[in-house]
Image: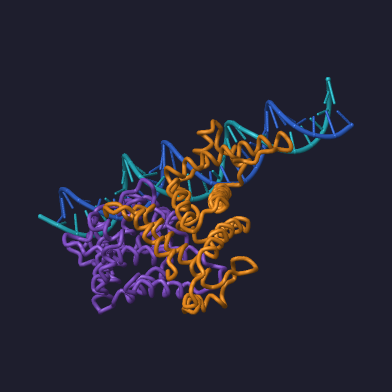
Chain colours: A purple, B orange, C blue, D cyan
DNA sequence: GGTTTCCGTGATAGCTTCTAACGGAAGCGT
DNA sequence: ACGCTTCCGTTAGAAGCTATCACGGAAACC
């Protein structure tokens, strides 16, 4: 998991301790959420006293930023591996759902409530773009959507306003499908993970599958 | 806004101070998020010293719970007023969007990342049910959906698993439309409010309208 | 082996939530 | 109108947190 092919023994040890810190941080986040993450508590559980961790992370914010980066990296790798094994858009959707259910707080760390002042560093957004590119590619590989899907109002707007998806942007109906894919599945997933369906009785995965079904249709 | 038709002068004063505390709390949440809400900071801005606020709220958690309750109440009233004025499902959707954009942190307070251990009190969930009921009613008033919308897999599952929406549950295709309405619009809204569309160039309200368009169609 | 670099510690400042004890003011009943 | 009671706001304090600093010691490097 951690690329610790160290050069010097010092860097080797340093990387190892950093990974151990992050492991404890993930454990803490999974049980109490990101807002309850405590540098002090991590240090105590590792057997050392408070300020020692500041040799490895500049502060709580940098630690959380690193966790966000790792979460994006994990999602990008998981989706990328599935895509490399030939998964189509539906397969990627189910992989995404499995990744989210495996650790809801990790999902919320990247797609949940943002801290108003926070700006993600450039390399973090680069990994986020990698996730999106994988999904856009799967959308492009899917459907030769009809011409009416290209001339609808939103794709028409998209034609002049698509400042992302790389240098060679996908056609607007593909980008539209990607956005719909993303927002619809995130809608189901985030409400499910947040517990807003508890007590309603139905099985959320069936709603997820129903939305996925509509998403794969020529007219989504 | 605040029902301060007091009985005793004491209760009158007490309710007034509670409202002032909550007003400062909202201001603080809007700028720095709910996780940065500080009882001490509120007290200082009100000109009194720290522990004084504990006469009015048992603690930080109870204050936040009260804010969540008020947020749900505000949303229920806003949607209810629009529905009373004859707004249809599309109108309610735009009212919901306006309510969310007016104070994103307030939206996240009710539909955002949950704290793992937290259980909302019963009266809070009661107001949340009122919001849902308003939307379900608007879905029921909308469409005499075709029989194929009733026999799809998910509505069929819903037929035996709908433990909500009151004693006289709506038909499964109506509940399905409500769930799709809720999850799709929440998907667009939450990602927009979280800033995940920034830098992409397109206008989120057009994606919102496009999703709303599909939502109103006989086959959503 | 000597030097340098880095790690972990304790002390400290400043913030937070929250409890406890005290003094005073306001309302209430007689 | 006076006394009693209830409640409000204060200061003091415990316990926790983030984060910085100065120090001693160990490890790595030359």
Residue A103 is situated, as x and y percent measured from the top left of the image, at 41, 67
B43 left or right of A48 in image: right
Q: Quadrant of residue B128?
A: bottom right
Image position, residue B139 (x, y; %): 52, 64
Front one among A210 and A21: A210
C30 on left or right of B220? right
Q: Is residue B27 visible?
A: yes
Q: Is residue B191 above or below residue A141?
A: above
Q: Nearer the viewer, residue A163 or B149?
A: B149
Which quarter of the rendered picture does the C terminus of chain B lie within?
bottom left
| Residue B61 showing in the rendered view | no
Q: Which residue: 59% across, 58% down?
A: B130
Q: Looking at the rendering, which quadrant does residue A127 occupy?
A: bottom left
Q: Quadrant of the N terminus of chain B?
A: top right
Front one among A209 and A79: A209
> Which residue does the image show at 34% across and 48% down from the upper left?
A118
Percent x, y of residue B205:
36, 53
The mark total stands at 0
Q: In the figure, is residue A152 to the left or right of C18?
A: left
Q: Where residue D15 appears, x then y in whole percent?
A: 53, 49
Judge from the rendering whether residue B92 lies leftward or rightward of residue A181; answer left or right.
Answer: right
């Amino acid at each position: 998991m951690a690329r610790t092919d160290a050069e010097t023994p010092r860097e080797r040890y340093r990387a190892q301790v950093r990974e151990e810190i992050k492991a404890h941080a993930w454990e803490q986040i999974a049980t109490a959420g990101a807002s309850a993450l405590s540098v002090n508590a991590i240090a105590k559980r590792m057997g050392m006293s408070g300020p020692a961790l500041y040799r490895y992370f500049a502060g709580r914010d940098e630690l959380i930023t690193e966790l966000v980066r790792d979460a994006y990296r994990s999602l990008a790798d998981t989706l990328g591996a599935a895509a490399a094994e030939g998964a189509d858009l539906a397969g990627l959707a189910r992989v995404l759902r499995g990744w989210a259910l495996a650790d809801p707080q990790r999902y919320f760390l990247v797609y949940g409530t943002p801290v108003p002042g926070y700006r993600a560093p450039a390399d973090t957004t680069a990994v986020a773009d990698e996730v999106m590119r994988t999904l856009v590619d799967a959308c492009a590989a899917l459907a030769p959507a009809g011409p009416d899907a290209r001339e609808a109002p939103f794709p028409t707007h998209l034609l002049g306003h698509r400042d992302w998806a790389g240098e060679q942007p996908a056609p607007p109906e593909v980008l539209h499908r990607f956005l719909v894919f993303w927002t619809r599945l995130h809608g189901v997933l985030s409400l499910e993970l947040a517990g807003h369906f508890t007590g309603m009785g139905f099985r959320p995965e069936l709603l997820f599958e129903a939305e996925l079904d509509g998403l794969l249709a020529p007219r989504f």
